[in-house]
Amino acid sequence: MMEEGSVYVCGNVTWETSLIKNKRGKAETVLWTPHRLEGAPKGWKVVTGSSSFHCFVLTTNGEAHGFGRNGAGQIGVGKYNAAVHVPQKAKVGSAEDPVIDAACGKAHSLFLLKSGAVFGCGVNGYGQLGTGSTSERCHTPVKCKIPGDKKCRAVAAGLDFSLVLTEDGEVYSFGCGEYGKLGIGTDGAHNTSGSSIKMGFHPFPTPRKILGLEDVRLIAAGNHHGLAATRTRVFAWGYGAYGRLGLGSTKNKDVFRPEMCECSGWVAMGKRMAEDKCLFKKLAAGKESSLAVLRERMTTYAWGKVKAAQPEADMYPKILQDLQGWDIRSISLGAGFIMVAADTSVIAWGAGTEGSLGFGDPPKFPKSSAQARKVEPLEGLTALSISAGANHTVMVLKETEDSKSILDALNVHTPVNISDADVGNDEDDFFETDGRKRKGPGRGRGRGRGRGISKRGR
């Protein structure tokens, strides 16, 4: 039986305008400490992504309840609107075939059902929903067309691409191939019509098998790179800047097919693992970094730009000393920050300029931290699940008699859904966020102002 708890969120929760240049409203709501999200169902897991402005709560009865930006229909509730503030049930899954996992891209979502089927909704201009065709957007989840109708056991979503792991250990990718992040040997680059200089990228709407990967146990997707773990190895591909692929100092470049991360430490540990055991407990990818949690010795390896203030990136996996010895239950990489649920603590560090780290109201408490530190308002609590987004964090906190006094001291955020009007896609959903802008497959604008009421818990 899966444990469940209440949903808490911190960071910028004005989903309509968060991080959109020239559209930010004066009434934005920033939660500097974790607030219980009123109206959210109890859940066992929460999901968002390093490029995402939307989230899902997965319940023990197999439902996915979403909230956040919804201009492209990425919440999957059958309509387009600027944002969903009060969580609503996505139109996917059933009592007979419940939702068991989900993944969030910048403006699309994936859902994994118990049957092994995968559904997706949101932006589909690059084919990131895997339907075999492209469309501007889709507000109701549609089934991904995995070749051979293979059953899947894991899903991952990058900014504008998707990965699925089949039950037989194969990995399929679909969506935008820029930087080689689909791992299929090409990025689909071409000169746009009417220009001999500006580059565009062909969509890849039909899932393709990534060659060279066999018996894969775990997958992860950052903004523009992918990871896959076999029993004792980790492979990476895609955008190579800042060492996020972990291929060594000579491989700070884009990689179009999977290559093995360089780490002698876990190779030695892998040789001691039993044949039926996987060395890796968890795998995560963010905007500019990656990490792997090992089952042995409570060790976590990280690579890339792990800490925003570090002068140089780690070009190959190194032990993350800050987490040595912690029993990690859940870990997530956001857009420049890390959130960890371990033992009865939540640990955070990185760039959290809008409250995503949850330390407290500035200037009394820091917005960011170059070193790992506990989120003091949550000390003594058990976080069952934690997920880091573009500039927010969502988590599930276990409720017990011992934790009641701590939980009662936390704030409550009471969101209000403003309007169900269709505002169209936000133009920002189609643009690169790592330095190079590119032509997107659609246009549109989204408007709206975040609303919410924060109050002390009773």
Image (cartoon, grey):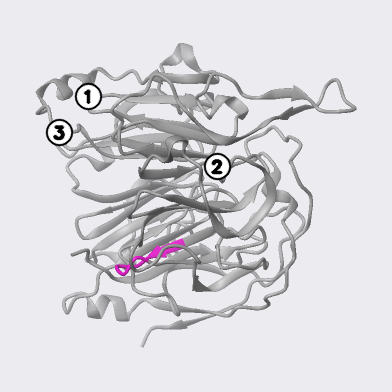
For the residues labelled 1 and 3, the Cα–Cα distance comes to 14 Å
Residue at the spot x=47%, y=63% of the render?
Answer: 92
Q: Circle 2 is placed at which residue position?
A: 130
Q: Which residues are magenta?
A: 56-62
The answer to whether residue 60 is magenta is yes
Say which of 356 and 45 sits in front.
45
Q: Is residue 308 visible?
A: no
Looking at the rendered structure, the secondary structure element under dot 2 is loop
Residue at the spot x=70%, y=45% of the render?
Answer: 430
The image shows residue 258, relative to residue 20, as above or below, that is: above
- Quarter holding the C terminus? bottom left
Q: Circle 3 is placed at which residue position?
A: 277
- Quarter holding the N terminus? bottom left
For the residues labelled 3 and 2, the Cα–Cα distance comes to 31 Å
The image shows residue 222, relative to residue 455, as above or below, that is: above
The image shows residue 282, relative to residue 313, as above or below, that is: below
Looking at the rendered structure, the secondary structure element under dot 1 is helix
